[in-house]
Amino acid sequence: MNPGMKLLLVMLIALEISFTQSLVVNCILIAVSLVYILTQHVSMKALFGIIFWPLFPAVGLFVSQWLYGSAGIHFAWILFTRIYGYVFLGATFTLTSSITDLSLTLEQDFHLPSKFAYGVLAAFNLMPKIVEEVQIIKTSALMRGEALHFWSPKLYFKSILSSIQWSQNLAEAMTSHGFVEDYPRTHYKVIRITALDWILFVVLFIIVQVLLFFIRY
Amino acid sequence: MTDVSINHFTFHYPDSDVKVLNDINITFKSHHFSLLSGPSGSGKSTLLYFIAGLYPHFSGIDAVGDIKFGDTNIKDIPRQDVSKSVAMMFQNPNQQFAMDTVIHEMTFVLENLRIEPAKMKDIITHALEFCDIQKLRSRVINTLSGGEKQKVALACIVAMDPQVTVLDEPFASIDPGSRVDLINKLKILQEKHGKTIILADHDLTSYQNLVDEFYYLDPDTHKISLLDGERAEHFFKNFESTQTINKKVAIPSGDENAIIKINDFKLLPHHSLLLKLAHFDFYKQKTTLITGANGIGKSTLFNALTKLLPYEGTIAFDGKDIKKIRPLPYAKHVTLLFQDAENQFLNITVKEELDLSLANRTNTDYSQADVDDMLNKLDMAGKDDRIVYSLSEGQKKKLQIIEMLIMNPPVLLMDEPFKGLDYHSLEVVVGFLNRAKHDFHQTQIVISHQLSGLDTLIDYHATFKNQNLAYQEVIK
């Protein structure tokens, strides 16, 4: 499915389950997402991550609603499954779609300005460098006799300074590579929203509506 | 013929009286390989950015005078067509790609130029073949070495096929092998394909019989002049003489006076072996100079010594494994002066910066009078309220050195501490370092390409070569 459409669908459904209270539908969404993810050959580590890490907020919500809430254990289970619903729906997108394809479709089909699409992509590709940079900032602060922690304002000040410098350099590099804002470009990989994409989008969306309408438990 | 002519070109920052470029009148000839030299921070980059059409768009400050490609003023070329005339290769290999993989970046470049998709594959294959990097085609750019990244940058330029290519210190952080490869490719582009190459570099190694013209940006007058054969020769000779010192140093042995001991050591960042040492010692209260080619791993060794990077084997400081010393106490004993001065700054003004060092130092060997004296001698007095980021590169370096001297750690590692300093300041700094060593018993380990002027400072010399570090008598 087209990554842009997929993202939109996932976000719509996630928004809906925030306002509905159906335990069964939440479970169906989680199950369907899991089956989809399993068919896409994702790594065991990633799968473990999306099952393990949400456990903390989910259990937290469950316990506080169950013990201290007024709406009972059924609602506690809804909250528990809602957290997993968000994570698994999100994972159907993040674990199976490439950020490059997303920017291509945002630029070509959703008519987002190209500077935005490529700017986001460039920033995303800089992520590993940012992690390194934070490490360098921390070490250089040690050399000045200061230990910076993740809550230290100086760490953020220095990181923001670096980011401004990098974004400037990156903009210059993109310009030097022929990129001109708001000017037409050709596309080697054309990503279209096909009829199949539309059908899938509409059918899946309707199915969720029907389920939510009939299954109120 | 598209000569690049610079006419009555003057540039200065609005809040400064100093002209970075002062009434420049030169012509970079078509189909020629021109070298523009001059000290770091003298304004070479500024001129190149204007030639590449990136300034004034990105600087926000325009210059007086004009730059012409043939008869056309660069400002009259529509923005979407500038890339057909000129492309630029940058100094920092890490910040010139927008996409994740080599093939995606090259596709991005061709899409920007509105090349028909059907032709892209052939253009890319040809450009990669020209640069001998077909095997990098699908690689993720972040996993490439500095030299490989610069080759990819060149492949992008080959694919774009502009008439003029400007390069801003493109070899500053890459290994010597890649440097030779890239220079040869540039020469082929110039000779066989009729391209115009304008390259700025302050390091003159291996350009002598290669370039057609040698331009020099004088840091005092801020003017650029074309040097004739004789004067160019003089500059190349002069440069060579700064690459060596006529001094024989002793080769240390034994481990009585060793302060840092390295054993069974392997440095393997990104899974490529940079350094393998069975045993190596650095000695107490001595200044050890480390030399070696760019990009070979000297700074990476410092990163290991300061626990910034993982390594195999053991490093012991004063008999204790550094992995067992907590980061902050260790940093107070073994301190690194970063190559990039800005990295070292944590505050906004000069005064705040100095106060931080005074507050966090572990001893009070330097009195306030000493500090004032150092500031005076380096012409840094009276700048208390200046914002550190607005200082010139040379001033940043001076402030950084004074700060780290005040901290007065037992071991001071310095990565290119003299970069961007004029010769007089260098002599003053050498005096400070000698005092720290003799009066305060400091151990100093220095990475430096600049050698002249360091005669009185250096006690030992270690060469970094072929994944090995070894003490040597001669300094070259």
Image (cartoon, coloured by chain):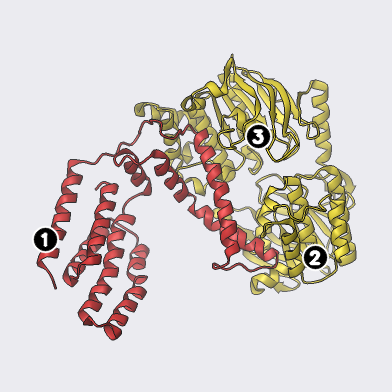
Q: Nearer the viewer, residue B362 or B210?
A: B362
User: Which secondary structure lies at badge 2?
Assistant: loop
Answer above or below: position of B300 versus B21.
below
- Counting from the top left corner in percent of width and height, residue B411 is at 77, 64
Q: CA distance from mark 2 to mark 3?
A: 37 Å
User: Label 3 sits on what residue type?
Assistant: Thr
Say which quadrant the C terminus of chain B sits in. top right
User: Label 1 sits on what residue type?
Assistant: Val
The reply, left or right, for residue B212 in relation to residue A82 is: right
User: Which secondary structure lies at badge 1?
Assistant: helix
CB under 8 Å between callouts 2 and 3? no
- Give the residue at mark 2: B408
- Counting from the top left corner in percent of width and height, residue B365 is at 85, 68
On the same chain, marks 3 and 1? The answer is no
First reached walking from the N terminus: tag 2 or tag 3:
3
The red chain is A
| Chain of the residue on which disc 2 is drawn | B
Say which quadrant the N terminus of chain B sits in. top right
Q: Tell me if residue B265 can be seen.
A: no
- Give the residue at mark 3: B46
Q: Residue reaching furthest left? A: A214
Q: Nearer the viewer, residue B407 or A125?
A: B407
- Counting from the top left corner in percent of width and height, residue B94 is at 56, 45
Identify the colour of chain B in the image.
yellow
